[in-house]
Image (cartoon, grey):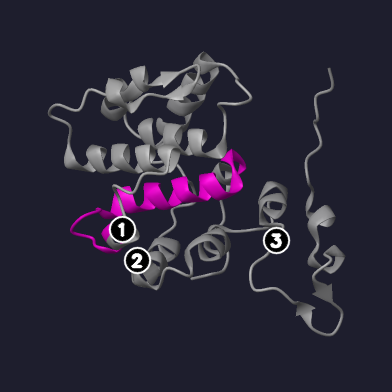
Amino acid sequence: MYINTFRYKPEDVDCKLCTEYRKKLGCTVKGCPFLAERIEAGVVGYGDAVQNTLAHHTALAPRLTALIRLFPGTMWADARHKPRMEAFKARQGYRRHRDTPAYYAAMYLLTANEDLHRRTANCFCKRGLEFAYALLRGIAPHDYTLFVAARDLFTGADGLTFTDLADPGVVDAVAFRLVVNALLVVRYGPVILDIRERGHGA
């Protein structure tokens, strides 16, 4: 069995090495096709990733601008979020067919706080997620928003729309940040959670 330990370094992902780069024009594409690799190398900031993923949703523009400007330097909800998710991920083990970016995005949302994690831990199984096992009675509106977003990202349902995300009365600022971060996980994989810099895009 071969375990790939290769990690991209900044010099590996220099734009001048890209097939889309032209000497006189620079980059010739609107969105970087190798953003995931550049994130892994640590040369892409939060603003770049958000804009590459969601810039075409114009209704979100005001909230995205504020989100990027106020980026706290971490993708996690608080200091306990990452250890909670990592411990739970280790307990679930690795399953090649189950462990997709959408699975990790749902796990990211459902481990955002202790109460939500306690209510949804039974949803995780060998095949993926069974949202019917969640204990939703008495759940806080904020946590319910995260639950619906996790379910939608994993199953492809549309209980939470981009119109909902654009409305601060429907999705509060903290939930908005976490849902946007989960959308980044779906697009780029869990490596996106390592972003520390705000970068451009604000």
Q: Is residue 41 left or right of residue 48?
A: right
Q: Secondary structure at mark 2?
A: helix
Q: Residues within 10 Å of mark 1 (few under 14, many from 20)?
A: many
What residue is at 39 percent from the left and 61 percent from the top? Answer: 67
* Res 26 quadrant in image: bottom right
Q: Nearer the viewer, mark 2 or mark 3?
A: 3
The answer to whether residue 67 is magenta is no
Q: Quadrant of the N terminus?
A: top right
Q: Residues within 10 Å of mark 3 (few under 14, many from 20)?
A: few
Labelled pair 2, 1 in contact (Cβ < 8 Å): yes
What residue is at 57 percent from the left and 68 percent from the top? Answer: 200
Residue 162: x and y, percent? 34, 60
Q: Is residue 127 above or below residue 171?
A: above
* Res 137 quadrant in image: top left
Residue lying farthest to the bottom in this orientation: 24
Residue 11: x and y, percent? 84, 56
Q: Name the residue type under label 3.
A: Pro
Residue 90: x and y, percent? 54, 18
Q: Secondary structure at mark 3?
A: loop
Q: Foreground: 82 or 179?
A: 179
Q: Is residue 142 above or below residue 114?
A: below
Question: Mainly helix, strand or loop, the magenta region?
Answer: helix
Residue 50: x and y, percent? 51, 60
Residue on which the image places disc 2: 63
Q: Secondary structure at mark 1?
A: helix
Q: Name the residue type under label 2.
A: Arg
Residue on which the image places disc 1: 165
For residue 33, the mark is 3
Q: Which residues are magenta?
A: 164-191
Q: Nearer the viewer, mark 2 or mark 1?
A: 1
Labelled pair 3, 1 in contact (Cβ < 8 Å): no
